[in-house]
């Protein structure tokens, strides 16, 4: 995958929250049902929101690349967690 991950803008983050996909505010204890499915849906939503230029290409991309890009976008937005520990 040759796409450089970029952070969510504040406006995009507000849209993500309104859609119910803010993964910083949910965990397995707060979600009734399929938590892993919610995470996958959230990562798909993030990719579609942050990378509109990929709209016509997403259906042909390997799913693992979409999930990876979603994860990398979250790291670009919030950090990896490692930096906060140090």
Image (spheres, rainbow, N blue to C red):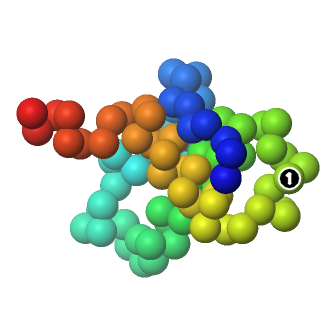
Q: Where does the image place residue 2, in percent across and percent down from the top left? A: 68, 45
**Residue at 51 percent of width and 41 percent of height:** 73
**Residue at 57 percent of width and 60 percent of height:** 67
Which residue reaches farthest bottom?
Answer: 33
Q: Can the viewer see residue 40?
A: yes
**Residue at 33 percent of width and 35 percent of height:** 79
Which residue reaches farthest top?
Answer: 10
Which residue reaches farthest right?
Answer: 56
Where on the picture, by quarter, is residue 40?
Answer: bottom right
In-front residue for pair 72/39:
72
Relative to 17, residue 34 above or below: below
Q: Quadrant of the C terminus?
A: top left
Q: Residues within 10 Å of mark 1 (few under 14, many from 20)?
A: few
> In the structure shown, which secondary structural element does the residue marked by tag 1 occupy?
loop
Q: Where does the image place residue 85, in percent across and percent down from the top left? A: 11, 38
Relative to 7, residue 44 above or below: below
In the rendered structure, the answer to whether residue 44 lies left or right of residue 29 reads right
In the rendered structure, the answer to whether residue 72 lies left or right of residue 11 reads left
Relative to 56, residue 27 above or below: below
Query: Which residue is labeled 1 in the image?
Result: 57
Q: Can the viewer see residue 21?
A: no
């Amino acid at each position: 995958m040759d796409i450089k991950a970029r952070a969510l803008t504040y406006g995009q983050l507000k849209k993500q929250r309104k859609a119910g996909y803010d993964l910083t505010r949910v965990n397995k204890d707060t979600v009734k049902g399929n938590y892993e499915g919610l995470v996958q849906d959230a990562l798909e939503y993030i990719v579609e929101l942050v990378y509109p230029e990929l709209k016509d290409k997403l259906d042909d991309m390997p799913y693992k690349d979409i999930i990876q890009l979603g994860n990398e976008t979250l790291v670009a937005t919030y950090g990896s967690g490692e930096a906060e520990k140090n």
